[in-house]
Amino acid sequence: MDGWFVHQGRKWFLMLRILIRLVACLQEKPYCLKKIGFGPFGTTNTTTTGQTAGFPFGASTGLFQNTQNKGFGFGGGFGAGTATGLTTGLVPGSTFGGFGAFGTQQQQQTGGLFGQALQPQTQSAQLINTASALSAPTLLGDERDAILAKWNQLQAFWGTGKGYFHNHLAPVEFTQENPFCRFKTVGFSCIPSNKDEDGLVALAFNKKEADIRNQQQLIVESLHKILGGLQQIMVNVEGIRALPDDQTEMVIYVVERFPNGNSRRVSATNLYSSLEQVNVKNHLMQLGVIVALPRTELSPAQMKQLLQNPPAGVDPIIWEQAKVDNPDPEKLIPVPMVGFKELLRRLKFQEQMTKQHQSRLDIISEDVNELQKNQATTVAKIAQYKRKLMDQAHKVLQVLIKQEIQRKAGYAIQAEEEQLRVQLDTIQSELNAPTQFKGRLNELMSQIRMQNHVGAVRSEERYSVDGDLLGEIKQHLKLQQEGLSHLINVLKEDLEDVKLIEQGLNESVHIRRDLFS
């Protein structure tokens, strides 16, 4: 950080030295300006795009001060563009979210350091006066002029005030657009992506979002009447969002219907031109509209001109570095920020956007919680249906056993049936084995009884268990108990089925013996 201040100090010191040399050169040999290379002071070229060679803060900035450009601008209209179509935002001279819409606008030729139409002689005089006020004022004629020079430098760095330097000359006005102002930086804003055919126009209302949503239908009807009230046009609302300082943005578009049944959207340029008419503007102000702006994208020529020409008062080196530091040149564009008001405005927009993101995250969190609840319910239902399916399977097996017994009645025992009986006997012996399922079940039952007995004996000892953990333990034990009960029931039913099969086999053996005897 210290190195940056040292670099900036050296740069401004070098610029002051150049200004001092310029003043001395003008006093001795005015024609030496052309030799030094300060083109704007000697000649002008009205056919160029506005960017001229020479001293950076004396040249016209083209994009922000040229004639008959498609209007697009930032912040407070750098370069002193006065048309409202060039600037965007909650108040004239600001933007919606940092980078506003772009519309076509005719403006008069402007130029010079402070956005005034200056002749070359006036430009050179302005530059000389600035250099004199910052380096060598002659107002008092003693050592106090050095203090006055430092005071003028402080005002120039701050970007406000007047620089007095001579008794018979008017003071120099210091604005935030002057190249010595330190309270400026370059940020990044999203490039508009809407086309002119989309017909989107943003209206900024000096009302809260809740009021606009409640009065949405009334506002739409009022806009329809303002635009002529024709039956073939219909005003639609694309979206509504809150802005800082209790203001709201409403994006609208107009659909025009034709007698043959077709329809199309009115272009954003035409709709914006209609809304900019004097009588229409008055009606919009009565509705609480602060500013109306078209939502259109930049053409490649406009993007090229915007990036090539640094804004007024912004060092070309800083502008070039901002283009290099752009994290996403396809979606973001560098935007100058001058003064604390612009910084505060962008901070408010950032806070507003953070609130919107947080509200969206809250909605998503609620949806996720609801989905988790539905998932838990679905899992429980699946487990229930699995148990029902197992019960139905056992019932079907019992029916098949009875049907098979009836079908095989009167027939001799086959080899497959004898093999099946051996397998069933083996299963029965495994179930009755002490170390197998029945023995383990008896062991578990005895352990449960022992635990109950120990718990009754040690009832005086108390332990504190977390409520959620206790609930999970109860749920786990309940599931274990249900599983054991279900397993016991299955074993009992299987034992009954085995007994029934043995009884059927014995009966069939007796019947065969009776038949053969």
Image (cartoon, rainbow, N blue to C red):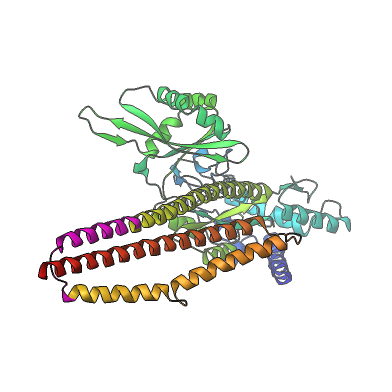
- The residue located at (39%, 33%) in the rendering is 236
Q: Nearer the viewer, residue 496 or 219?
A: 496
Q: Nearer the viewer, residue 439 or 91?
A: 439
Q: Position of residue 37 (x, y in %)?
A: 57, 65
395 drawn magenta: yes
Q: Is residue 436 above or below residue 359?
A: below
What's drawn in magenta, residue-wise?
391-415
441 drawn magenta: no
Q: Is residue 25 visible?
A: no
Q: Position of residue 62 (x, y in %)?
A: 50, 52
- The residue located at (30%, 56%) in the rendering is 395
Give left or right: position of 180 versus 47.
Answer: right
Q: Nearer the viewer, residue 352 or 205?
A: 352
- The residue located at (48%, 73%) in the rendering is 439
Q: Position of residue 220 (x, y in %)?
A: 43, 27
Quadrant in which the N terminus is drawn: bottom right
